[in-house]
Image (cartoon, helix red, strand yellow):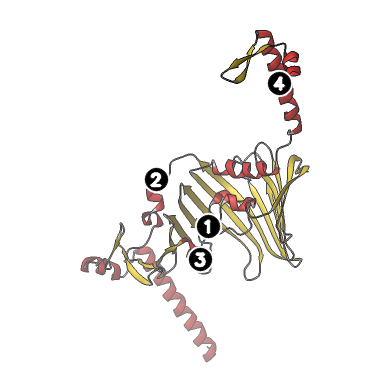
Amino acid sequence: MSGVVKLLGMDCQRRPKQKTKELHCTMTHKHLIYVFLICIFCFSIVREVYADPSALALLRGVEVERMRYEPIQARFTIQYINDDDFGTITRSYFAEVAGSSRRFEVFATDNSDVFPGSVSILKDGEIYHYRRRESGGVRHYDLAEAVRRADLVYDPRVLGLVDNPTADTTVRQCMLYDVYTDVSLVGRAVINETNVWHVRCIHFSQATADFWIEEPSFRVHRKQVETARLNVIIDSVFDSKSVGPFPSEIRIKRFEDTKQVFNRIFHIEEIVHGNPITHERFSLTSMDLPINTDVVDYRIGRRVGYWDGEKIVDNPVEISAQELRELMRPPQRGPVQYLGIGIGGAMILLGLYLFLRRRLGV
């Protein structure tokens, strides 16, 4: 201790006080400068040793950066390539998130009989799901049932982090650091001419998950998960259209026992964040339900009412006799319709005349 005291040039004396000794030091401005310079030197050494970010910090950085975007609205398409049943198809989606509320709409394709549109709303842990088809009703159940049914109502902030998200998938779950036992920084790498950090997570089952993360933007350029039978590769493309940590294009391939079973391309068309989203967007009003659509609560196994255009009521909305006559009245024909009927009749008569003439040999 005396050596350190002499090194700092401090005037110290030991003075007795109630059977104890206390060190009293008098420091000048010169001594304070010496201490400050020593602290700066030590800090520079520590900074040099820890210049590389830790693997866990990179994974958490991705989570924090993505979750900053709230409220958020995302429009995107998914191209399903070489589907076993329908070939290559493209579908459009619109997802909205505000707090714990979520709305997810799937738009119908040209072949709406096979691929009808649907809309799902998550609010207070409960799901309302409606598929836009004839005689379709609103299904009401909890989040676990939505996961079991594979309803599309996932958080758009997980795009590019998982191959097949479900209603309960979170950004934190996608980063895997909670369930993988070993998280390490492999080193630097280059993806699409971009310098990134390569982070590897190893599960106790020897499954691995690799992330290639750009820092400080926390953009994930690639994620690959490998198990004994599974290999999932997620490649993300960033360009001038990309918003924050979200890519403009995502290519996902999934292999099982070396056979490709999954090939999808996501195109992020628009991401809007920070703008308030009204509460009505997370209610049945935003579903554009037909009058008298029934609402069934699958948790209790029975119908709870009908949609009257504004709320759920116990009984179907009655239609007046005048409204019923308007619905049943045949459409009125104008001059164009009568002209078409006349031409059609003339063609039929001409065809019949030619047929009889040929048969009779006239």
Q: From the image, which quarter does the N terminus lie in?
A: top right
Q: Are there few (<14), some (14-19), or many (20+) residues within 10 Å of tag 3?
A: few
Marks 1, 2: nearer the viewer: 1
Marks 2, 3: nearer the viewer: 2
> Between marks 2 and 3, how big is the CA–CA gap?
29 Å
Q: Which residue is painted at 49% across and 39% down in the image?
A: 274
Q: Amino acid at mark 1?
A: Asp
Q: Is residue 294 visible?
A: yes
Question: Measured along the vertical axis of the image, is residue 234 above or below residue 87?
Answer: above
Residue 77 lies, in percent from the top left, at 58, 54
Q: Earlier in the sequence, mark 4 or mark 1?
A: 4
Marks 2, 4: nearer the viewer: 4
Marks 3, 4: nearer the viewer: 4
> Between marks 3 and 4, how big is the CA–CA gap?
68 Å
Q: Amino acid at mark 3?
A: Ser
64 vs 6, nearest the viewer: 6
Q: The residue tagged with tag 4: helix, strand or loop?
A: helix
> Between marks 1 and 2, how big is the CA–CA gap?
23 Å
Q: Amino acid at mark 2?
A: Thr
Residue 40 lies, in percent from the top left, at 71, 21
Q: Which residue is painted at 39% across and 54% down in the image?
A: 286
Q: Quadrant of residue 134?
A: bottom left
* Mark 4 and mark 1 residues within 8 Å of each other at the beta carbon: no
> Between marks 2 and 4, how big is the CA–CA gap?
52 Å
Give the labeled residue for mark 3.
112
Give the labeled residue for mark 1.
168
Q: Earlier in the sequence, mark 2 or mark 4?
A: 4
* Mark 2 and mark 4 residues within 8 Å of each other at the beta carbon: no
- Residue 278 tag number: 2
Q: Quadrant of residue 179?
A: bottom right
Marks 4, 1: nearer the viewer: 4
Q: Amino acid at mark 4?
A: Ile
